[in-house]
Image: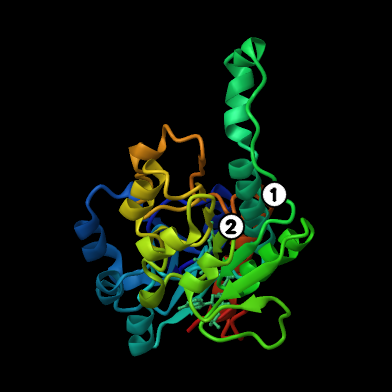
Amino acid sequence: MDSIGVLMPIHMNSYLEQELQKRFNVFKLWTFPNKTLFLKEHSSSIRAIVGNAAAGADAETIEALPNLEIVSSFSVGIDKVDLNKCREKGIRVTNTPDVLTDDVADLAIGLILAVLRRLCEGDRYVRSGKWKKGDYKLNTKFTGKRVGIIGMGRIGKAVAKRAEAFSCPISYYTRSEKGDLEYKYYPSVVELASNCDILVVACPLIEETRHIINREVIDALGQKGVLINIGRGPHVDEPELVKALVEGRLGGAGLDVYENEPEVPEELFGLENVVLLPHVGSGTVETRTAMADLVINNLEAHFLKKPLLTPVV
Ligand code: NAP
């Protein structure tokens, strides 16, 4: 298989790159100064793309690669892959579900605790020596708070399971009610937001879920409510979120993802009720290794004409 051209648009993980290079002819796009020239010279030898949550395969890239057969994404979210274009051209698409679920759900709980219990602020309080001048202020209890979840798939369910251990009543919104779940279902995001203290976004980014968190939802969540986004940045109308936090219309936010990564609105930097992470939901050594293995196993299966492990298209 070492003659098969595999394109990586950006650097994503050293282990993934090394393992791919052992098996395929890997083109690291970021090492080529002139992308147009690169495509002119190498486009016909590329049969696979390995993308991720930041860079996948848009229509232009797909059109530029006449022999592309598969896009294997180093992520579960495939919002950076033009799925319609892939379907139209018979290009297969795979992702990395399940192996990252626990980490992302763990991080959601971590963000909830960090926001409510002011973990980052408390840490800064100790490091700056302020503790010597007086005790830290009181913060907010997590146990028993009402947790609402948008998207009750693999990650949503894993967040719910963890929150149940904190005695939290769980409710959710998805396009259709899940008959097998005992959690309370709300048929709209506004109703869900009106009936929870903490709202967790865990659905895929598709056209209908872009700005699923808008001003109306933020206001329904209210002055004491906390928004946790471990989905994708464009789920949230970010200027509206910033305004609500600055004006005190929302209680707090824990964010792993942003509309225009790695840009983060600077107005958030000074707010104590906000915890900001650099899109690290699946960012542990263990999980990124498992994700890399899944990417490679999907590519090998494809080129050996075996069934794909985790097909999307
Ligand atoms: P999943 O198992 O496919 O679950 C998706 C859930 O979202 C399902 O319950 C689905 O239910 C619901 N959903 C789909 N469309 C919806 C809509 N229009 N409105 C409301 N709910 C909708 O996916 P997953 O593995 O849990 O992953 C979820 C997302 O998490 C990924 O797509 C990815 O973007 C994000 N993620 C982020 C990180 C990170 O680093 N922060 C890491 C991994 C994943 P219905 O179909 O019934 O609506």
Q: Is residue 205 visible?
A: yes
Looking at the rendered structure, the kind of residue marked 1 is Phe
Residue 44 picture quarter: bottom left
Q: Residue at x 20, y 58 (%)?
A: 37
> Residue 312, percent across and down?
51, 81
Looking at the rendered structure, the kind of residue marked 2 is Ile
Question: Would you call the spot at circle 1 few (<14 residues within 10 Å), some (14-19), or many (20 or more)?
Answer: many
Residue sitting nearer the eye, 304 or 258: 258
Residue sitting nearer the eye, 284 or 200: 200
The secondary structure type at the circle numbered 2 is strand
Per the rendering, the mark at residue 198 is 2
> Residue 122, percent across and down?
62, 28
Residue 76 picture quarter: bottom right
Q: Is mark 1 within 8 Å of ligand 1?
A: no
With 300 as the anchor, is 12 left or right in this view? Answer: left
- Is 175 located above or below residue 200 in the figure? below
Per the rendering, the mark at residue 142 is 1
Q: Is mark 2 within 8 Å of ligand 1?
A: no
Q: Earlier in the sequence, mark 1 or mark 2?
A: 1
Q: Residue at x 72, y 61 (%)?
A: 168
- Is 264 located above or below residue 289 in the figure? above
With 274 as the anchor, is 243 left or right in this view? Answer: left
> Residue 248, percent across and down?
42, 44
Q: Is residue 76 visible?
A: no
- Is 178 located above or below residue 100 in the figure? below
Alpha-carbon distance for marks 1 and 2? 9 Å
Residue 126 picture quarter: top right
> Residue 297, percent across and down?
62, 71
Q: Residue at x 46, y 70 (%)?
A: 190
